[in-house]
């Protein structure tokens, strides 16, 4: 295994595969903060050259966190399809990139391939891709999942209706949710981040939303994004939850900081199957984002992009209905500016889809980042072109509870119209029945909440 390269008559030598992966990453402020990023453009190019020549077997034999000490590594390796891995293990990472981008390689080919790749392999091939490569490769991969409705249907783009409220006011939540529904947002899920993480709040919000869904016969799913243990307590008290949510990470220590383990997520999945209200079989909703492990000091010297890939490797074990990245949510200490967040969004979409996940993106940013609405809109359009299953739908694009910027109900409608995409089929029929949509376009009733007073 050769870990050396020469660039512009300068010789570079790397000690480990983990170092090669870190140095080959596009510049991210989190990697620089952790002291593991490339110190120059030449060193980054050298690392990419070395990475391109490594075989998949080299990477398999060198997980960035040892199997013996890390639960995430064990979940990834124990779930690997060894027949598929053995078929491709002699490929170099450069050859893997060429195979994925080849116009003759189909969606089915890539989906089968992904089952035999570890997360480090998937991160490695993404590091060798340009933004256009990532869009093209992501577009080729389609992953569907079913809770109460089916997400990822070709020609569709779904949205999470996210009517958060800074005081958990049911009236405020309902008003924002209704507005989103009139603009066609909510077919992915109606998902609320509660201010108070307790079973009573979760139960109250679930009952209000579920009652409204039943009254208006809305074909979607509902989820309250509290800690998974809080949701479990609420369901034990009789709360009607379709999807169980949890933030997850790419190292065991980071997951422990989140208060979770593989066994706990299995327990939640079992509860969703036997006590939840979702049809299934896909009943979990995971949220991730580059940099969480670094912000928690749980990165083990691994770059934030590779850790994000490992997050997807951990999450695919539970066959989720939804996974989305919020890489722009933490702030400039992990993702510094608009350029970095757009790159992270495209990397994450591709890596999640190659893992076989029904992947969505929250192309978000915080107000203390060097990013603005134009950066966010460019990221949104690129990820929509790349086949993101869904985006967020936030009133006015400004989440007044979490204090960050994301796609608005209006943005959602615009992206659908620009790219000729439709809501999920069951939801579009409901929109037409309500008069909010006709022939795939919103009607004049969009934004008119009085439609629910009839």
Image (tube, grey):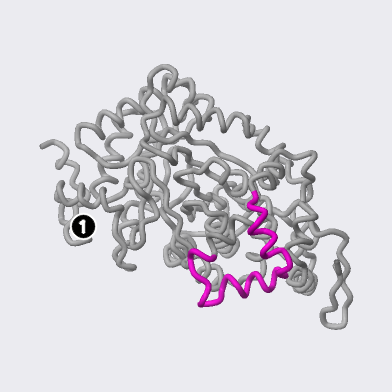
**Residue located beneath label 1 in the image:** 442
- The number of numbered discs placed on residues in the rendered structure image is 1
In the picture, which quadrant includes the N terminus? bottom right
Q: Is residue 84 rendered magenta in the image?
A: yes
- The image quadrant of residue 252 is top right
The majority secondary structure of the magenta stretch comes to helix
Q: Position of residue 259 (x, y in %)?
A: 63, 30
Residue at (25, 32) in percent of width and height: 212
Q: Is residue 121 above or below residue 197?
A: below
Q: Is residue 390 left or right of residue 228?
A: left
Q: Is residue 105 above or below residue 356?
A: below
- Of residues 290 and 260, the one drawn nearer to the viewer in this rendering: 260
Q: Is residue 94 rendered magenta in the image?
A: yes
Q: Which residues are magenta?
A: 80-109
Residue at (80, 65) in percent of width and height: 39
What element does badge 1 sit on? strand
Q: Position of residue 80 (x, y in %)?
A: 65, 50
In the current view of this chain or complex, which residue is farthest to the top? 237
**Dot 1 alpha-carbon crowd within 10 angstroms: few under 14, some 14 to 19, many 20 or more:** many
Q: Is residue 4 above or below residue 409?
A: below
Can residue 371 be seen? yes
In the picture, which quadrant includes the C terminus? top left
Residue at (67, 33) in percent of width and height: 257
Q: Is residue 119 left or right of residue 232?
A: right
- Of residues 189 and 68, the one drawn nearer to the viewer in this rendering: 68
Can residue 366 be seen? no
Q: Position of residue 448 (x, y in %)?
A: 18, 46
Residue at (38, 19) in percent of width and height: 238
- The image quadrant of residue 66 is top right
């Amino acid at each position: 295994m050769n870990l050396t390269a020469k660039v512009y008559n300068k010789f570079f030598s790397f000690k480990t595969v983990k170092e090669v992966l870190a140095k080959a990453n596009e510049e991210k402020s989190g990697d620089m903060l952790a002291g593991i990023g490339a110190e120059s453009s030449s060193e980054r190019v050298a690392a990419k050259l070395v990475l391109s020549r490594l075989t998949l077997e080299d990477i398999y034999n060198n997980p960035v966190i040892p199997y013996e000490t890390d639960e995430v590594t064990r979940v990834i390796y124990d779930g690997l399809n060894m027949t598929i891995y053995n078929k491709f293990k002699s490929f170099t990472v450069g050859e893997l990139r060429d195979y994925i981008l080849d116009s003759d390689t189909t969606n089915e080919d890539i989906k089968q391939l992904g089952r035999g790749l570890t997360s480090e392999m998937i991160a490695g091939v993404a590091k060798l891709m340009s933004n256009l490569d990532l869009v093209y490769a992501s577009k080729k991969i389609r992953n569907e999942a079913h809770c109460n409705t089916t997400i990822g249907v070709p020609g569709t783009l779904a949205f999470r209706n996210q009517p958060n409220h800074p005081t958990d006011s049911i009236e405020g939540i309902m008003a924002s949710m209704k507005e989103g529904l009139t603009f066609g947002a909510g077919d992915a899920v109606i998902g609320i981040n509660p201010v108070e993480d307790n079973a009573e709040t979760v139960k109250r919000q679930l009952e209000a939303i579920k009652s409204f869904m039943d009254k208006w016969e809305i074909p979607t799913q509902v989820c309250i994004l509290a800690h998974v243990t809080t949701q479990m307590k609420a369901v034990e008290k009789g709360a009607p939850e379709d999807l169980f949510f949890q933030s997850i990470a790419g190292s065991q220590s980071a997951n422990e900081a989140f208060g979770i383990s593989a066994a706990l997520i299995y327990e939640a999945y079992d509860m969703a199957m036997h006590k939840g209200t979702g049809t299934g079989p896909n009943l979990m909703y995971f949220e991730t984002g580059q940099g969480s492990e670094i912000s928690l000091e749980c990165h083990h010297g691994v770059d934030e992009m590779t850790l994000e890939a490992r997050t997807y490797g951990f999450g695919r074990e539970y066959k989720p209905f939804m996974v989305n990245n919020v890489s722009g949510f933490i702030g400039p200490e992990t993702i510094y500016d608009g350029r970095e967040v757009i790159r992270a969004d495209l990397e994450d979409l591709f890596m999640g889809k190659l893992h076989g996940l029904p992947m969505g993106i929250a192309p978000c940013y915080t107000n203390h980042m060097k990013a603005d609405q134009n950066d966010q809109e460019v990221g949104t359009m690129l990820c929509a072109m790349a086949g993101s299953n869904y985006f967020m739908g936030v009133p006015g694009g400004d989440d007044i509870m979490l204090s960050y910027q994301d796609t608005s109900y209006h943005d959602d409608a615009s992206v659908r119209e620009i790219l000729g995409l439709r809501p999920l089929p069951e939801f579009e029929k409901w929109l037409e029945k309500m008069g909010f949509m006709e022939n795939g376009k919103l009607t004049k009733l969009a934004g008119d909440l009085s439609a629910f007073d009839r």
